[in-house]
Image (cartoon, rainbow, N blue to C red):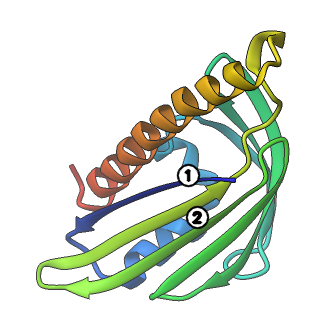
């Protein structure tokens, strides 16, 4: 299992961030590799939906269930090609809210491109983890800009 983390301060309340996270239909607008979301059922805790995500040269599909949603903590779990757990925490700070995300995920396959060796898989994992850190940083910046009206 791999982990990627990121954080930013957004000049809005925790409730505004919670509402944005619950608005899963709009997530592709601020999540760079999230290509589409469909079959959304519900909102907040108990919501489920399907998604298509691009990682490197490949696209993957899966489903997500939101298991917790409050102004302090938002948790979702994905199943399918990229099993993962996303934990978002919101902490009120001077000037807004610190938003922190921790994503634990399993990289599919062992060696992209059919190579399959342990060395290739380890190298692929490092490249993918670096890309995923970049994606989290970009997603947080895009969500910040969106919520602050920039």
Marks 2 and 1: in contact by CB < 8 Å? yes
Residue drawn at (63%, 24%) of the image: 124
* Above/below status of 21 relative to 27: below
- x%, y% of residue 120? 69, 19
* Above/below status of 27 relative to 99: above
The crowd level at tag 1 (other Cα within 10 Å; few <14, some 14-19, many 20+) is: few
The crowd level at tag 2 (other Cα within 10 Å; few <14, some 14-19, many 20+) is: few
Q: Secondary structure at mark 2?
A: loop
Residue drawn at (69%, 53%) of the image: 1
Which quadrant holds residue 16?
bottom left
Residue drawn at (68%, 69%) of the image: 76
Residue 26 disc label: 1
* Above/below status of 9 relative to 6: below
**Alpha carbon distance from label 1 to label 2:** 6 Å
- Residue under numbered circle 2: 23
- x%, y% of residue 91? 32, 85
105 left or right, relative to 79: left
* Above/below status of 72 relative to 133: below
Which quadrant holds residue 44?
bottom right
Residue drawn at (71%, 26%) of the image: 121
Q: Nearer the viewer, residue 21 or 138?
A: 138
Q: Residue furthest left?
A: 94
4 left or right, relative to 22: left
């Amino acid at each position: 299992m791999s982990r990627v983390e990121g954080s930013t301060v957004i000049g809005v309340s925790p409730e505004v961030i919670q509402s944005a996270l619950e608005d899963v239909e709009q997530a592709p607008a601020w999540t760079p590799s999230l290509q589409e979301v469909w079959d959304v059922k519900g909102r907040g805790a108990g919501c489920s939906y399907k998604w298509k995500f691009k990682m490197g040269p490949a696209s993957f599909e899966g489903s997500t269930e939101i298991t917790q949603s409050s102004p302090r903590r938002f948790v979702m779990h994905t199943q399918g090609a990229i099993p993962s757990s996303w934990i978002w925490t919101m902490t009120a700070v001077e000037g807004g809210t610190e938003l922190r995300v921790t994503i634990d995920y399993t990289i599919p396959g062992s060696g992209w491109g059919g190579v399959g060796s342990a060395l290739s898989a380890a190298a692929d994992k490092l490249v993918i983890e670096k890309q995923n850190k970049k994606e989290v940083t970009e997603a947080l910046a895009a969500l910040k800009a969106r919520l602050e009206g920039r």
